[in-house]
Structures are given as C-alpha cells and as structure tokens.
C-alpha cells in the first residue's frame, strides 16, 4: 500500500493496523477521522491510551481488569462470596454481567489449555484458582468456559484438581451451541445457561 508523505501519519496507520481485525485501509480511514478532530480532542484520545498502559491493574483476587488492587465486583459487598464463576477472559466477564443473571464473583483464567498453541495449565491462572478456593472455601464453582475442545479440556483439568474438595462444581447449561465462545453468545441464551447450570460431573458421560 502506497504511503502518504508524512512519517507521523504513516506511523499512526501502522500502529492501528497492527491490531487484530484492522487492516491498512481501515487504519487509514480511522487516522483520517482522527485528523478531523481538534487538537484538544486528539490529545484527550491519546491520553486515554497512555492512562490505560500506566494506570490499569489486574485484580489481585480474580484477575479482572481494575483501576485498583481489588476490582469493583470483588469489592462489592452485595456480590456473593459463595459462588465463583470461572471464565477465560475479561470479555466473558462483560458478557455474563450484561445478562444480569449472576450475582457471585469471577475468576479470570487469562486463557484456556491449548497444547496446539503451547498453552499449559501453568500458563494460566489455574494454580491461583485452586489456592483461592482453598482459602475462601466458596460453596459453588461455575465453569463458564467456551464449549470448545480446549474449553472442555480446561474444565476437566480443573475438575480433577478439585474433585477431592467439597465444592459443588457446575457448568453452564448447553443452551450454548458446541464450539461457541461465551463472548459472542447472545445475552438471553447466556443468561439462561447461567441460571440453568448443571453439575459438571453429569456432563462427563457425554464425552
């Protein structure tokens, strides 16, 4: 793609096009739109991303993104400490929160077990989950991972690690199609899947 005779412009296009799902043409249009903003708006736009890199933290309890050591969900006394919902990433937290059907707390794994991609149990927050359960002793753990082979493998690994405990391990109902990812599931289906969750051990016979 032919570049414009401005290094700063081309650099901005290059940085935007490095993001997933944004090609050179889309990046070019976005930069042109940004140039139409006044300087104060443009500086404010840039500062938002500088603040993101300098001020964002991860909750020391659930690993959700936060502005403080403890995220607003974990700090909320109205949220139940008795139920922990295990999700792959922060987008899944957002998806489940949008259903307004869950009032417990979360544990963000930061990925799922995927040997093909070189991701093992030690590469995600499973050890931290086990330690958290041992310390906090919640009554229920909801496995809300994507219904993919990797998601199921991660569910089973966690189940085997906790089988000796008294915690009730459940999984979201299979209203979500096999192979679907949580973040792309519509709110109604996801909400029903949370409400109608089933014991995880009941799903093992389906494998």
Image: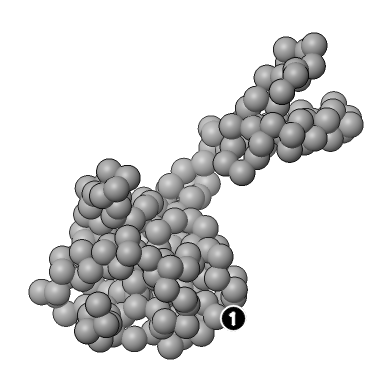
Residue at 48%, 56% in the rendered image: 90
Disc 1 element: helix
Between 154 and 39, the one lying in front of the other is 154
Q: Which residue is mark 1?
A: 188
- Report the residue that reaches farthest toward the left: 164
Residue 207, compared with residue 196, is above or below; it is above
| Residue under the image location 59 percent in, 32 percent down | 18
Residue at 15 percent of width and 66 percent of height? 161
Image coords of residue 75 (percent x, y): 45, 62
Q: Is residue 182 above or below residue 119?
A: below
Residue 133 can be seen in this image: no
Image quadrant assignment for residue 143: bottom left
Image position, residue 110 (x, y; %):
38, 51
Q: Point out residue 191 in the picture as x, y percentages from the top left corner.
A: 53, 80
| Quadrant in which residue 142 is drawn | bottom left
Q: State the image coordinates of residue 111 (x, y, percent, origin top left).
A: 37, 52
Disc 1 crowd rating (10 Å Cα; few below 14, some 14-19, many 20+) is few
14 to the left or right of 155: right
């Amino acid at each position: 793609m032919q570049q414009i005779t401005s290094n700063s412009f081309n650099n901005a296009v290059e940085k935007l096009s490095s993001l997933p799902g944004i090609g050179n043409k889309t990046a070019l249009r976005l930069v042109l739109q940004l140039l139409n903003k006044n300087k104060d708006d443009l500086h404010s736009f840039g500062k938002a991303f500088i603040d993101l890199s300098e001020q964002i933290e991860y909750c020391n309890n659930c690993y959700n993104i936060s502005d403080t050591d403890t995220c607003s969900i974990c700090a909320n006394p109205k949220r139940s400490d008795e139920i922990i919902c295990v999700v792959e990433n922060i987008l899944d937290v957002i998806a489940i929160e949008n259903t307004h059907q869950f009032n417990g707390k979360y544990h963000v794994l930061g990925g799922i077990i995927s040997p093909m991609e070189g991701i093992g149990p030690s590469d995600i927050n499973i050890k931290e989950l086990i330690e958290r359960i041992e310390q906090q002793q919640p009554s229920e753990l909801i496995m809300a991972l994507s219904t993919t082979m990797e998601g199921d493998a991660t569910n089973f690994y966690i189940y085997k690690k906790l089988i000796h405990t008294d915690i009730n391990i459940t999984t979201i109902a299979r209203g979500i199609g096999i192979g679907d990812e949580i973040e792309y599931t519509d709110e109604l289906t996801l909400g029903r899947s949370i409400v109608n969750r089933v014991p995880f051990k009941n799903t093992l016979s389906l494998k």
